[in-house]
Amino acid sequence: MTKLTTKPSLINFLRKNRIFLGVLVIGILFLGYFLTKDNTPEMRTATVTRQNLTEAINASGELQAKTSAELRFTTPSRVTWIGVDKGDVVKKWQSVASLDRRTLEKNLRKKLLDYQTTRWDFEQTQDNYDVEGRKLDDALLTEAERRILEKSQFGLDKSVLDVEIANLAAEDSVLVSPIGGTVVSIGGLVAGENLTAANLATKVIKIADLSSMQFVAQVDEVDYGKIHLGQKVSVMLDAFPNETFEGTVSYINKEGFKTLSGGVTIPIEITLSKEDERLVVGLSGEADFIVAERQNVLTVPREFIKTVEGKEVVYILEDGKPIMKQVQTGIATISQTEIISGIEENQQIILQKNGADAKK
């Protein structure tokens, strides 16, 4: 028996090959796009205008008190009195806290008694071995006598030092502020607590003269050469984003500091022109160091300036073609560049994104 066969219809063919056909259609569309795409360079224009320019160096930093002091006890003992709290204003040489003096004073008396005993022993030794007025460098002294007398002298010297140290500890039992200012921290000190050798270093009373506020900016080493004493600075603080605080460079640090990225920054101290009671230690912000200022000069957007064969140029459009013009530039800001010569006010310049050959 003969088997009948039929050819696949066009519909069946399309059903079986629809994925292939889809890819083919997309490929044709892409080909058409690239064939018809306009490869003309994208062009931007700008006008040469007059304005005031200020060239500045920007650096971040924070507010610090030019005059400040950190007070801490040096001897473990019990805190008996704290006379200040955060925000209090203190005068110079004012007492702010004290330890229990009883133990310290008794220790001082004990050292004085030890000294007196040592002193008597020393004098007795002198009487025993120096009855004829001989001195330690006298050749008539035996080696044993010399050592006994020297040991006696050492013991007396040590006793004197013990008394002086005990006396200093008694004096240091009261913390006294060496400056007038505001208490910004009491270091967690609590009256009645016993200080130990382990926590002495952390229990610190900090006092700052808030009338001597200054902004310390960390200037990058590449900009260091443009900083000088008396230079005008504008300070912008994060806490007051809509205000500017004027100041001048008062000190240039003589030591640079390595950054995590491997660079070097130099701390620059800026004295603010006016006192402001709102300013507190630690506020962060940025400083603009004024390098140069120009009034009513020709300017163009900075990105329109190009360098060709070591010369600075801009492009103008003549008869639909870009023409290169050499220019002489002056100071530059982040966005604008001063034009000294080469083009004129109100002249149109162009910037081509895709690039094109320009006539000179």
Image (cartoon, rainbow, N blue to C red):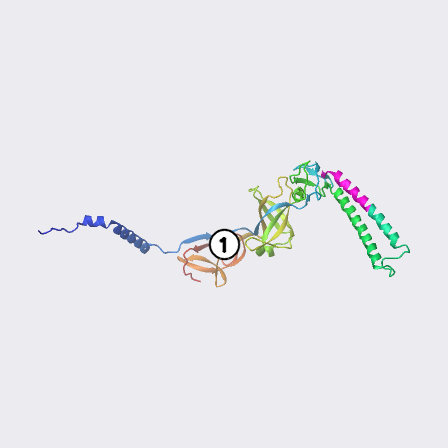
Query: Which one is nearer the viewer's eye here, 68 or 57?
Result: 68
Q: How far across and down, in percent of the image, does residue 224 sit? A: 60, 55
Q: How far across and down, in percent of the image, does residue 264 sit? A: 58, 55
Name the residue furthest right: 132
Task: From the image, give the main secondary structure of the stretch colored magenta.
Answer: helix
Residue 232 lies in the magenta-colored region: no
Which residue is rendered at x = 81% and y = 46% of the image?
Answer: 115
Which residue is rendered at x = 26% and y = 52% of the image?
Answer: 20
Circle 1 sits in a helix, a strand or a loop, which is it?
helix
| Residue density around tag 1, few if under 14, some if 14–19, many if 20 or more, within 10 Å | some
* Residue type beneath disc 1: Arg
Q: Which residues are magenta?
A: 97-115
Query: Which one is nearer the viewer's eye here, 258 or 331?
Result: 258
For the C terminus, the image quarter is bottom left
Query: Which one is nearer the viewer's eye here, 149 or 307?
Result: 149
Where does label 1 land, which residue?
A: 302
Q: How far across and down, in percent of the image, does residue 278 sit? A: 62, 39
Q: Specify the quadrant of the image occupied by residue 149.
A: bottom right
* Apparent side of residue 256 relative to residue 46 in the rendered image (left or right): right
Which residue is rendered at x = 83% and y = 55% of the image?
Answer: 148
Q: How far across and down, in percent of the image, does residue 192 sit? A: 69, 36
Name the residue furthest bottom: 309
